[in-house]
Amino acid sequence: MISMLWLGNVMAVKPDSFQSSLLRDVRLFAAVTSLSKEALI
């Protein structure tokens, strides 16, 4: 369920500028990291 919220946040961010694109990458990285932790646990 958390992963769904993360994907929603990533999709909500539009890469109009470099800053928003960077923010999207950071959120995506955070989502992958959280998913990896859940998988390890």
Image: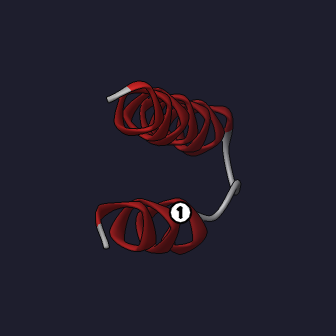
Pick whichever, 14 or 27, lies toward us: 27
Pick whichever, 28 or 32, lies toward us: 32
Relative height, residue 26 to residue 5 (above, below): above
Relative height, residue 4 to residue 19 (above, below): below
* x 31%, y 73%: residue: 1
Horizontal placement of 20 versus 34: left or right?
right
Name the residue carrying label 1.
13
Residue 25: image location, x then y, percent: 61, 34
Quarter where residue 11 is shown: bottom right
Pick whichever, 23 or 8, lies toward us: 8
Horizontal placement of 6 versus 2: left or right?
right
Residue 21: image location, x then y, percent: 65, 41
What's the coloring here? Answer: secondary structure
Quarter where residue 24 is shown: top right
Relative height, residue 19 to residue 31 (above, below): above
Quarter where residue 41 is shown: top left
